[in-house]
Image (cartoon, grey):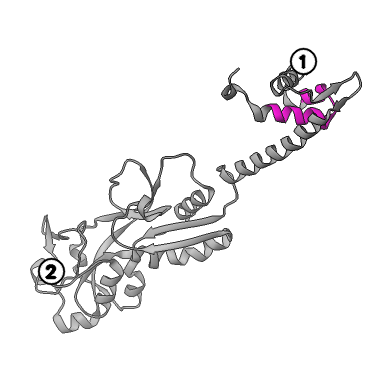
């Protein structure tokens, strides 16, 4: 029998049971084996090791000096294996470090209120939240989970849908008092329209124009790299902006921002996903707990 064909931990476990339970019959019952199978296993073990481990008698088993040493080391090895499996298995305690990559808008308006709840449920978890609107490589960024919108570009990634939100055009009341309220795409083109600077951004804003859908171009003079920067510029009166409804919900309720061209809103939605690397075995318990928590608690 080759070395790789030997179940060495299984041999150790049966041997330890035989010693602790005081006989082959009791060990066989505990291990789901026959007494003769246990006896043959111990004999094979002794033959492979080249040492007698147990002196047999009709009444009891007696360990030899070599058997005592092997028994003590076997206990240590089996305990270490059990500990390693507890830490590596999917059922391990929810603890450790999680790095989350998300947009500033989602991070501030959706994720932030949920963080204290998650930390209360799993106090042994440490979170790092990185805000960026650009698409990141999860491996390069050492991110466990990323919150994204749109289709996946990598087949190694798995996405779990968290929800969807509509987009809407908004502006501050002060800006509209100074520049007027646009009521058509043509009138909106005379206003400052804040755009995104990253390459995956839409070329313009979709709006209804009669029975057609037209694209309202975005001003090149004022662009930002993330949604929160756009929101703050809109609040400051720098122009009109198109943002996710959840990002401006509180501003609309407080009248810091108001809807613009809402009757021309085509009702398109943006879907949000928790994205993670899906290859390489079961997810760590801490990541699985976070994904389940987000699925159950995110409301857009």
SS class of the residue under badge 2? loop
> Where are the magenta residues, as a range?
11-29
**Residue position for label 2:** 220
Q: In this view of the protein, which residue sits in the foreground, 125 or 3?
A: 3
SS class of the residue under badge 1? helix
- In the image, is residue 212 above or below residue 4? below
Q: Quadrant of the N terminus?
A: top right
Picture mark count: 2
Query: Is 121 positioned to the left or the right of 65 in the image?
Result: left
Q: In this view of the protein, which residue sits in the foreground, 172 or 57?
A: 57
- Label disc, if present, on residue 112 of the rendered structure: none
Query: Is 8 positioned to the left or the right of 200 in the image?
Result: right
Marks 1 and 2, how far apart at CA: 84 Å
Q: In the image, residue 277 lies at what x, y percent?
A: 40, 45
Farthest-out residue, right: 59
Does 26 lie within the magenta span?
yes
Q: In this view of the protein, which residue sits in the foreground, 183 or 167?
A: 167
Q: Residue at x 48, y 56 (%)?
A: 98
Query: Is 112 positioned to the left or the right of 3 in the image?
Result: left
Farthest-out residue, front: 50
Q: In the image, residue 104 lies at what x, y percent?
A: 34, 66
**Residue position for label 1:** 36
Query: Is 51 positioned to the left or the right of 106 in the image?
Result: right
Q: Quadrant of the C terminus?
A: bottom left
- In the image, is residue 164 above or below residue 82? below
**The quarter of the displayed image where residue 7 is located:** top right
Q: Badge 1 local density, few (<14 within 10 Å), some, or many (20+)?
A: few
- Of helix, strand and loop, which mostly describes the magenta segment? helix
Q: Residue at x 22, y 83 (%)?
A: 174
Please tell me which of labels 1 and 2 falls first in the chain.
1
Q: Residue at x 45, y 52 (%)?
A: 295
Does 33 lie within the magenta span?
no
């Amino acid at each position: 029998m080759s070395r790789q064909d030997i179940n060495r931990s299984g041999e150790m476990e049966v041997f330890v049971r035989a010693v602790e339970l005081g006989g082959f019959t009791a060990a066989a019952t505990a291990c789901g084996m026959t007494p003769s199978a246990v006896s043959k296993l111990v004999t094979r073990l002794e033959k492979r090791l080249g040492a007698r481990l147990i002196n047999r008698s009709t009444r009891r088993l007696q360990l030899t000096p070599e058997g005592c040493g092997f028994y003590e080391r076997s206990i240590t090895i089996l305990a270490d294996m059990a500990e390693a499996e507890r830490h590596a298995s999917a059922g391990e305690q929810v603890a450790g470090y999680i790095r989350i990559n998300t947009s500033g808008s989602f991070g501030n308006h959706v994720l932030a209120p949920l963080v204290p709840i998650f930390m209360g449920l799993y106090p042994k978890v440490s979170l790092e939240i990185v805000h960026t609107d650009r698409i990141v490589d999860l491996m390069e960024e050492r991110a466990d989970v990323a919150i994204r919108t749109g289709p996946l570009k990598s087949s190694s990634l798995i996405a779990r849908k968290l929800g969807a939100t509509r987009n809407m055009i908004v502006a501050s009341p002060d800006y509209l008092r100074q520049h007027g309220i646009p009521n058509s795409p043509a009138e909106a083109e005379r206003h400052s329209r804040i755009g995104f600077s990253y390459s995956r951004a839409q070329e313009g804003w979709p709006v209804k124009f009669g029975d057609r859908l037209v694209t309202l171009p975005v001003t090149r003079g004022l662009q930002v790299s993330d949604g929160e920067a756009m929101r703050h510029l809109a609040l400051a009166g720098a122009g009109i902006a198109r943002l996710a409804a959840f990002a401006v919900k509180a501003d609309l309720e407080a009248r810091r921002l108001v809807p613009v061209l809402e009757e021309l809103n085509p009702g398109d939605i943006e879907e949000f996903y928790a994205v993670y690397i899906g290859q390489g075995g079961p997810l760590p318990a801490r990541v699985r707990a976070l994904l389940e928590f987000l699925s159950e608690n995110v409301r857009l």
